[in-house]
Image (spheres, rainbow, N blue to C red):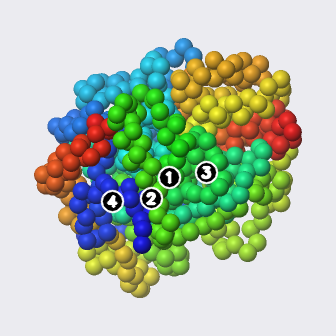
Amino acid sequence: MGLTLFEKLWSEHVVEAYDDGTDLVYIDRIFLHERTGSIALASLEAQGRTVFCPEQVFCSMDHIVDTYPDRTDETTMPSGKEFILATRRHSHAAGITLFDLNDPRQGIVHVVSPEQGIVQPGVSLVCPDSHTCTQGAMGALAWGIGSSEAEHALVTKTLRVLRPKTMRVRFDGRLAPGVTAKDMILHLISTHGANGARGCAVEFTGQAVAELDMEGRMTLCNMAVEFSAFTGLIAPDEKTIAFLRGRPYAPAGALWQQAADYWRTLRSSPDARYDRELVIDCASLEPQVTWGTSPQHAVGISACVPAADGLDAATAESQRQACAYIGLAPGQALAGLPIDAAFIGSCTNSRISDLRQAAAVLRGRQVAKGLRAICVPGSMQVKAQAEAEGLDQIFTAAGFEWRASGCSMCFFAGGEHFGYRERVISTTNRNFESRQGPETRTHLASPVTVAASAVRGCITDPRELLQP
Amino acid sequence: MMDKFTRHEGVAAVLLRSNVDTDAIIPSREMKRVSKEGLGEGLFAGWRYLAGAGRQKNPGFVLNQDGYQGASILLSGPNFGCGSSREHAVWALKEFGFRAVIAPGFGAIFASNCVRNGILPLVLAAGQVAKIAEWVAADPARNRVVIDLPAQQVEAAGQVYSFDIEPGARQMLVEGLDSVALTQTRWDLIQAFHERRRLSRPWLY
């Protein structure tokens, strides 16, 4: 019996296997950011420990930095500067590569890493950030860890990890216009629960995945962690290889062919067995939007807040709490619900294809009166590319703020935020309580749905505004 | 060296919600310093304090209620600690005085962070957690929960519940091991692997 892609990637990196189901796994590359990486580097220094292989360690400033065009080390987040300065100092001392505030390569870790070609098929890559699973879209073994594990990986270039089980999610059929990777992953999580892939590495396959561009695949893998997966991954194909060609850290010359030949072997064997398999039909999928406080609270945009009928007591109680928080009642329709703000950005949906899709809706239109709308490109390179294409003009003409790159208002760190109990439609990945501001009510959706909703001032099916 | 976890008896706090995420355990706005310390005050800040009222306690939240003072064990719902990888969630629980969380399941990164900080993420079935919670709530100060990690047993509600834990994690907790130092004993193997990989995948180096 052949191996799954995940099993191939995993066994490629096992230094030593233990009989309790854990393995000592070799880590090719490590990414840090100023929020959690600063603590890991400071802790190492305090213990007198050093980074084993600093040329394989990268760091970006993304979590705390402001996204105003004229930003400096000063931040709207109280004490944010301390994180920035500590990260800069420790990064230089450790000899790792830092994409600093004014570096044209700066941006969100999970946007920068593929953009620079740092993540490649077949590598193992960790970062003290839960959305590291995004990078599994490149056919890599990439997963999020804590700060202590980051220290361990920095010093030993390994982690001891319980070997996950395997799951395959096959997305059959073809997406309808206006339906995106974001809708695929929200639908998967709502169908099988935020706990649905607990303990599993999830490989995404099927026609709808094959037809996604690389950035759509990153969106899909990004939210694997919201599905409780150890990570998400997609087998590399010719799109993956074409995406990597010519990127700064991609192989060049004779090594390119050697690498590409290896990458083409990274696919699950036809007779490989998975511990679990799920199938999702994409042909009938409509744009998704969340109604509650967990990514599993997603429904088709024409649906209503679900009733608690038939749920067990604990789930019904959680649903009641979610309704109370979000200010909605079971049976209430999502479409037409007035919103106060719209946000396009984050490691889920801030890449050039996301901005192009949103701009296609916004072209020649204005956001609703009184609505606050913000677009934060995922990296300075995405920003530059968007500006070269004139997308910034479309966003600003429509009434969107056009920002420098960073995680921005995906989360509220004490600085900039959405208002008390404001209703926000957002391309981010978490609709948790107070995630984007004090008691802010977040509705997760795709960039096209957010753009359409911004124009109408209420939650809107983007297909109503898309050209036929 | 981490605190060792062998046998622990303590007051259990009941927070039976599903999907308690690490943003709820420690909101990002409470992570004010480049430090693992000073986080206990921010634990569950969004629920523990009244909105817009500084640090005025919310009397409806379990950790502010009589009987639950000094709680060192938390009983919660499935998928506890999901979401952000922030280890601050564990540092905040630890500083507040928690030594164990009992739930039907945990976010994977959170569970790993717990083990590396001397906190036990203990999995019991939802029905068992509910039963213990009901018993605790009847008289939380008196109905204390006992956890015996080497024996992998919980004593509560007049019963003994067995639980599973990965042997490596149990050893780390019971012996209070430093995982980096433990792995450094395998240094020769790691070095050899590293050198082999430089040859087999040269484009990465």
Q: Amino acid at mark 1?
A: Ala
Q: Is residue A188 above or below residue A408?
A: below
Residue A11 image label: 4
Q: Residues within 10 Å of mark 2 (few under 14, many from 20)?
A: many
Structural distance between the alpha carbons of marks 3 and 4: 25 Å
Q: Residue at x 48, y 35 (%)?
A: A244
Residue carrying label 2: A5
Q: Amino acid at mark 4?
A: Ser
Q: Chain of mark 4?
A: A
Structural distance between the alpha carbons of marks 2 and 3: 15 Å
Q: Amino acid at mark 2?
A: Leu
On the same chain, marks 2 and 1? The answer is yes
Q: Are marks 2 and 1 in contact (CB under 8 Å)?
A: yes
On the same chain, marks 3 and 4? The answer is yes
Residue B200: percent from left, percent from top: 27, 46
Residue A370 image label: none
Which of the two discs, 3 and 1, labels the residue nearer the N terminus?
3
Asked which secondary structure carries label 2, the reply is: helix
On the same chain, marks 3 and 1? The answer is yes
Q: Amino acid at mark 3?
A: Ala
Which of the two discs, 2 and 3, labels the residue nearer the N terminus?
2
Residue A175 visible to an observer of this rendering = yes
On the same chain, marks 4 and 1? The answer is yes
Structural distance between the alpha carbons of marks 3 and 1: 9 Å
Return the residue nearer the eye: B75 or B77: B77
Quadrant of the image occupied by residue A94: top left
Residue A288: percent from left, percent from top: 73, 51
Q: Are marks 3 and 1 in contact (CB under 8 Å)?
A: no
Residue carrying label 1: A235
